[in-house]
Image (cartoon, grey):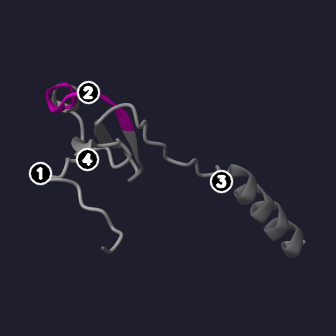
Amino acid sequence: MRMLRWMILGGAVILVVTPARAQSYDPRYPVCLQVWQWGGSYYFDCSYTTWDQCRANAVGLAAMCLDNPYWPRARPRPSGGRLRSSTPY
């Protein structure tokens, strides 16, 4: 009888546990808002084009604004002179 109770309890625990979902960053926006929720979980909302937009939405929340790590940044061009070839003379 005890074994049956433990099996039912174990099965209930397995059914209650929800699967984790992968966090996705939207590469179309340069700024993300990280929001903490009750219980220690958090999520990212990457839908801001400026820091000011993000800060305005973070007011009153347990949140902070971050740079989107997946936003493609423009690469600086090399300055001065002509381009050098990688082949030897």
User: Residue at label 3?
Assistant: 17
Label 2 environment density (alpha carbons within 10 Å; few <14, some 14–19, many ≥20): few
Q: Measure the alpha-carbon separation of dots 2 and 3.
A: 36 Å
Q: Measure the alpha-carbon separation of dots 2 and 4.
A: 19 Å
Label 3 environment density (alpha carbons within 10 Å; few <14, some 14–19, many ≥20): few
User: Residue at label 1?
Assistant: 79
**What span is colored magenta in the figure?**
45-54
- Are the two marked residues, 2 and 3, in contact with CB atoms closer than 8 angstroms? no
Q: Amino acid at mark 1?
A: Ser
Element assignment for label 1: loop
Q: Measure the alpha-carbon separation of dots 3 and 1.
A: 56 Å
- Are the two marked residues, 2 and 4, in contact with CB atoms closer than 8 angstroms? no
Q: Disc 2 or disc 3, which is closer to the eye?
A: 2
Taking the image as shown, residue 22 lies to the left or right of residue 10, namely left
Residue occupying the point 39% across, 31% down: 28
Counting from the top left corner in percent of width and height, residue 27 is at 41, 37
Q: Residue furthest left?
A: 80
Q: Disc 2 or disc 1, which is closer to the eye?
A: 1
Q: Disc 2 or disc 4, which is closer to the eye?
A: 4
User: Residue at label 4?
Assistant: 75
Q: Measure the alpha-carbon separation of dots 4 and 1.
A: 12 Å
Q: Is residue 68 magenta?
A: no
Q: Quadrant of the N terminus?
A: bottom right
Decide which of 22, 6 is in the foreground and name it: 22
Sequence-first tag of 3 and 1: 3
User: Residue at label 2?
Assistant: 49
